[in-house]
Every structure is written in structure tokens, then in C-alpha cells.
Image (tube, rainbow, N blue to C red):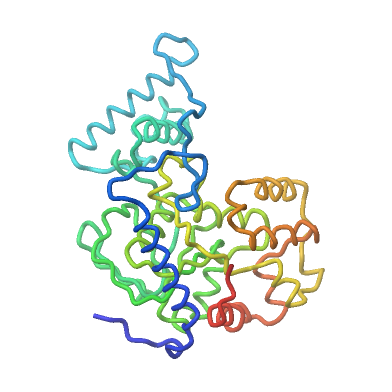
Amino acid sequence: MAFAPVGPEASFFDAVDRHRASLLAMLKRDAGETPAGATRVASRFDDSVGLQMIPQCTTRKIKSNSPKSVKKFALILKILSMIYKLIQSNTYATKRDIYYTDSQLFGNQAAVDSIIDDISCMLKVPRRSLHVLSTSKGLIAGNLRYMEEDGTRVQCADSATATAVPTNIQGMQNLITDAKFLLIVEKDATFQRLLDDNFCSRMSPCIMVTGKGIPDLNTRLLVKKLWDTFQIPVFTLVDADPYGIEIMCIYKYGSMSMSFDAHNLTIPTIRWLGLLPSDVKRLNIPKDRLIPLTRHDQLKLDSLLRRPYITYQPFWKKEMEMMADSKMKAEIQALTFLSSGYLSRVYLPNKLRFGGWI
């Protein structure tokens, strides 16, 4: 059953539809170039996958007979035994659940998180294959409905507020949408403002997701699942600052800490919709609405410009160099200088209608 269209007329999405057609053609072409059963040699960066582990990477050794690592070794065995029981009983637990089974033994949550990541990397399997889940912090809204593993039916469009990203993404079934695009919003405050402005209804059919800053694993898995299932264009809305750009890169290319699971987490077809540094200049945002780059910002920007994937994104590089030259950054909220509803009623609709992404 299709969703009832309540957004703009179909021709409004011509640029988005053309973009999707080009993505599908690219996927078909790439599939034809890779023989069935072929495997790629892991490298530090692959533009079609993202950041990956390299074969000769630095390793960490834990010895049972070393006084320095005996506790870490014991904790690894403890968590491995818990994982074994979870798999045997076909049940799941969150990292928080594991920590609270013996909080005094583990000491802190970070120790549990680190060991679980090490086990995933060591066994070369996604964390969900260990039956260990993360607590979700992300939100989703718009034209999407699905059934959770326990049979609960979720209709995101029917909710007055956003729906929490499920804890078990793998258990999501019967996903249905007519969405023309998926918009990833960096910050929760911006996401909530768009909800208040009925952005999802006025730009229907669409889906909107936020990871509330640096995305948790489940939000990344959800975005990946939506891309793999529907192959609709995915756009990002982030602040025009180095940390907003880095968050966008995590969705698109992954992170070093989870590089062993890049195939299951990254969406290299993501495009940067806004806020672009060139938009700040084009819209004549006053200087008093901008923020000077701090020393940490400049170091982060320099680091981003040196990353291997920027070679494949000349338009991104140009925007980042513009930011570096101006020594200024801008939050999405700077657009309220033009009008309180400018972001949802003018900026984003024009970007989508005329293909204003890079």
C-alpha cells in the first residue's frame, strides 16, 4: 500500500529523481565490473566502501602470563563466555547490560565497549553477530513503516514526534516507503525544528534521520539498511564547521575504530546538501552571525584535508579551503538571520528542487 502524497507536485523532485537514476546506473556499472565471487584486497581507503583495515596494521597483543595484561585477558574471556551464552540461547544484550552484570569487575562502561570492539575486530564479524547491541540515541521521522522483530508495527509518519531508532536493526522487517530521499540531520535541535515546521509533510515523501551529533552504531546501521533496501538519494545537513564535516564523513566513509566493518556501515553515495561555506557567502550571512575557527577547529580542518577520501571529493575540498581561508565557521541556525522559517521553507526546498548538493 502506497503512502498518500501530501507534498509538492511530482515535477518538484525532477533533480532528485535524475540523481537517483545516475546512482542506480553507477551501481549497475560497478556490479558489472566486479566478477561474481571476487573479493577485494583490504586497503586503507576504497572510494566505493570507505575506510578499511589494512593487512599489515598495528596490532595489540594480550598475554595471559603477563602481569600488565592479565586483567584485560581475564575480562576478554569473561565477555567471550557471555557472548557464547547469548548466541547459544539466541538472545541479545546491550553493552550496558553486560557492564551491569558485574560493574565492579569491569570498572567502567568504556572498558566493556573497548573489549567488545576488540572481539569484533579479532573475529572479523559485526558486533550484532556477537548478539551484543548498542543503546540507540538516534531518531527517525517521515514516510517509513516497518515491523520490529517482536512483531510490533511502526509507522513513523503517524507519530506526532520522531520515532527512536530500533536497538536491533537486523530485526527490522517489511520496510515500506515511497520516499524520494533520505535527509541525515547532524544535530537534534535542527531535527526538532524541522519537525516543528512539518518539513517531512511539506517535502513528502521523504525520510529524516538524526544521530544527535556523532552517530551511534545503530543509526549508522539504519541509514545503511535504508540505502541497501531502497537505494534512494541520501543527503546530509550539517553545520559548516570541521566537526559537522567529520560527522558527514563518518556516515559516508566510516571511522577508523569501526573500519573492520566498513562494508556494513558506510554509504559512499551520500551527498553534502548543506550548510556549505559557499552558501554562507552567497546568502550574505553577516559576520556577527559567524564564529571564528578555534585552534582545534583549524587542526581538525587540516586533518580532514589530508584524509585520502578528500582526493575523490574536489568540491568538498574547495568548500573546506574556503572555510580555511575565511577562518570562520557557521552553524545551521545562522540561517535564521534571513527568517525564522528560512531553513525549512526556502533553503532546503530550493536545494532539493535545483540539485544544490555536492
Q: Is residue 255 above or below residue 350?
A: above
Q: Quadrant of the C terminus?
A: bottom right
Q: Quadrant of the N terminus?
A: bottom left
Q: Position of residue 254 (x, y in %)?
A: 49, 48
Q: Is residue 332 above or below residue 301?
A: below
Q: For the view shown, which residue lies furthest in the bottom direction?
A: 9
Q: Residue at the spot x=65%, y=80% of the render?
A: 340
Q: Position of residue 309 (x, y in %)?
A: 57, 50
Q: Position of residue 61 (x, y in %)?
A: 46, 19
Q: Quadrant of residue 21?
A: bottom left
Q: In the shown orientation, is residue 285 left or right of residue 191?
A: right
Q: Residue at the spot x=48%, y=69% of the render?
A: 183
Q: In the shown orientation, is residue 243 left or right of residue 249?
A: right
Q: For the view shown, which residue lies furthest in the left direction?
A: 89
Q: Quadrant of residue 242?
A: bottom right
Q: Is residue 352 above or below residue 257?
A: below
Q: Residue at the spot x=45%, y=10% of the render?
A: 66
Q: Residue at the spot x=46%, y=89% of the render?
A: 11
Q: In the shown orientation, is residue 222 left or right of residue 323?
A: left
Q: Is residue 126 above or below residue 294?
A: above
